[in-house]
Amino acid sequence: MLRHLGPQFPPEQHPELLVGLARPDDAAVYALDDQRALVQTLDFFAPLVDDPYQFGAIAAANAMSDVYAMGGRVLFALNIAAFPDDLPPDVIADVLRGGADKVREAGAVVAGGHTIIDEEPKYGLAVTGEVARDQVRTTGGAQPGDTIILTKEIGTGVLIGANQQGAVSSEHWEAAVAQMMSLNKDAAEVASAPDLAAGVHAIADVTGFGLAGHLQEMAELSDAAIEIDLGAAPALGGLSEAVAAGFGSGGQGRNREYYGARLGIEGARALNPFEETLLYDPQTSGGLLIAAGVIEAPHLIHELRQRGVTATPIARVTESVAGGRLSVRPTEVPRV
């Protein structure tokens, strides 16, 4: 669908557009001058949770994550909303309040927005941020020797579906919601710290394409071979039980169909359903994938954990490969 847009905006005619249609990434980046650039993104979706305040907070955190994935900070946001005309005003207010609280937590401001009437509620943000031009971090750029660090746990897609059927304990569900509501602000700030930023070569956030999809994109855009250590991939509490009970998601199936054909599996053992979930489960407001050099990676992990951020090394860049390559190294004993 997008191939019709590219010819209308030739890159040579828009040199100030540093990140746009030419290469896929988390947000657009537009140069203001030699030092500064704007970061722009937009995201919205239908409710994934029953609580309207939590829905608003999760949607806002998810939208702002794309600015953090470019190495930027959030300046302001505009609400994007669709609500049925018979939805009680206090419910709508709670959705907007949840989003506003997250924008305020980001140190930014809600400056307006647009609302339409629709049968199914939808909410999100158009987010504007800024970044120093030498601090822009794209999905491409990972280098041989890099460690790839994940800053949240995996499993929101399956747990959302399982919770809708009452199959998740309150403890595990509350932990999943808390993670989806948490900002990637601290992780982005640590990755942009003066003593670490030079060794941070690429950043992406994990959302609808799952761990395999976003790492596949990083491999392709970096012309790099990336190997996933499946034994290290962190899982949310209750995920293994939900998978064992047969819960999955449509997005997981689509990710498996598309990215599974590109994924190399080392060894002769096939992956089990739980391991496939770790790879293909689509995430809502997922963590950042940060590719850092061999010297900086241990310090980055330490600083992230000092800030209370989950920081798990889950993959490594093994070599340069034209077009990229993604493989997975399962554990000797299958994870369940």
Image (cartoon, rainbow, N blue to C red):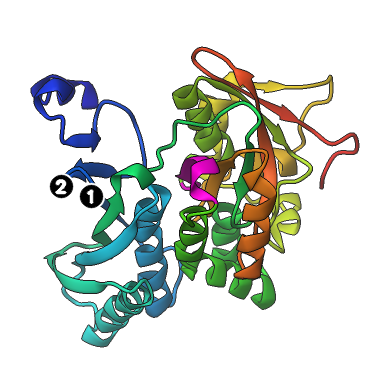
Q: Residue at x 57, y 57 (%)?
A: 156
Position above or below: 59 against 249: below
Whole-percent x, y for residue 314 in the image: 69, 43
Residue 122 appearing in the image: no
Amino acid beneath label 1 = Arg
Q: Residue at x 25, y 79 (%)?
A: 92
Q: Please tell me how crowded label 2 is: few (under 14), some (14-19), or many (20+) other residues with Cα within 10 Å.
A: some
Whole-percent x, y for residue 61 in the image: 40, 64
Whole-percent x, y for residue 36 in the image: 23, 50
Position above or below: 212 against 289: above
The residue lying toward the viewer, choosing from 29 and 303, is 303
- Number of residue marks: 2
Residue 13 appearing in the image: yes
The residue lying toward the viewer, choosing from 133 and 279, is 133
Magenta segment, which residues? 196-207
Q: Residue furthest bottom?
A: 90
Q: Quadrant of residue 4?
A: top left
> Is residue 217 magenta-colored?
no
Q: Identify the disc placed on residue 32.
A: 2
Amino acid beneath label 2 = Leu
> Is residue 197 magenta-colored?
yes
